[in-house]
Amino acid sequence: MPAGITTTGVLSDSLDDVRSSARTIREYGPIMARLVDTTRLADGIGLDWKEVFLNKLSATNIDELTDLEQSPQEIVDGVFSIRPTSVGMSVFVTDRTKKRISALVAAKMGVLIENAMSRKKDIDLIAIAQSATTNLGSAGQPMTSGFVAAAMSRIGGNSTEPWDGPVCTVLHPFQKKDIQDEITAGIGTYTIPVGLSSDVFLKGWSGGSLYDTELWTDGNISTDSSDDAIGFSFAKGSGGAIVHVEGIASRMITERKENIGTGAEIMYATDEYGNGIRQSAWSFAYTTDVTAPTS
């Protein structure tokens, strides 16, 4: 008979293989949907959401003999429209799989689907914001706060159609880091006075506001092969630059498939929406370098 001390290594075949926890991979939460003008396409009115706009009229000098009936101004209209399109995904899981895997893992499947659908909407809204007619940045160059200051001034002061409501700025996290470096640029050169610079040095910059724009970071802003990314500022909320039109309400359903082996379930998730820029003068982009910071 074998002699010795019984250890876990000796009885390795008797040890249960148990998963004590499960998690989904962390990702950036959706930002854009809370910043844009969200509306819904009503039932029974066709495929497109439409908004009519009326062009400006002009008044002129007159004297006491001017016959205004002879020179009426024509009211000219136009239409801004968005057509929602569908997005969706599915996950197919056999009954045997659900019976054999950890219940902790099975419980996370629905969360993964919800995250994927939310990320898709956020990325689509980022893309429409990045399509702004004017890009103030330059590939390979750092992000600067001056770009935001310029955009804020041009959104509120343009002659096309000035905006007097709130403005938001959405940046890649590394673009925000460049602005934070501006605030603490005096380190090593001169003493930082008590105030904004010292607070950022001690605690980091949480953002919040920049040149009277609401500042947000969104890690779903992609980086290209040259380590550049596109941030942006735009007129925020109701009546603002970007319109998000919801069509058929999002849904998630599960369907039984008895013809697959010993049974299975397929989970479907669908949504319908469309995005558009209402007024290009209210939106500016910033292409800048977003190489991972090292100091």
Image (spheres, rainbow, N blue to C red):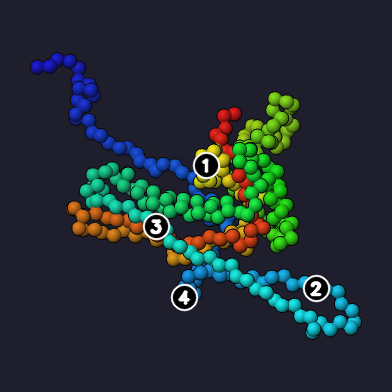
Disc 1 marks which residue?
A: 224
Amino acid type at image mark 4: Gly
Q: Residue 286, image x and y in percent?
A: 62, 46
* Residue sitting at x 74%, y 72%: 57
Residue placed most toward the observer, 262 or 150:
150
**Label placed on residue 96:** none
Give the distance between the C-alpha atoms of the residues marked 2 and 4, in whole angstroms.
40 Å
SS under mark 1: loop
Q: Nearer the viewer, mark 1 or mark 3?
A: 1
Image marks 2 and 1: residues in contact by CB distance under 8 Å: no
Q: Earlier in the sequence, mark 4 or mark 3?
A: 4
Mark 1 surroundings within 10 Å by alpha-carbon count, few (fewer than 14), some (14 through 19), many (20 or more): few
Which image quadrant is residue 293 in? top right
Give the distance between the C-alpha atoms of the residues marked 2 and 1, in whole angstroms.
50 Å
Question: In the displayed structure, does residue 103 sit left or right of residue 83?
Answer: left
Disc 2 marks which residue?
A: 59
Mark 3 surroundings within 10 Å by alpha-carbon count, few (fewer than 14), some (14 through 19), many (20 or more): some
Q: Is residue 282 above or below residue 230?
A: below
SS under mark 2: loop
* Residue sitting at x 60%, y 70%: 79
Residue 238 appears in view: no
Q: Residue 227, image x and y in percent?
A: 54, 38
Q: Is residue 289 above or below residue 36?
A: above
**Label placed on residue 44:** 4
Disc 3 marks which residue?
A: 88
Q: Earlier in the sequence, mark 1 or mark 3?
A: 3
- Which quarter of the rendering shows the C terminus? top right
Give the distance between the C-alpha atoms of the residues marked 4 and 3, in whole angstroms.
23 Å
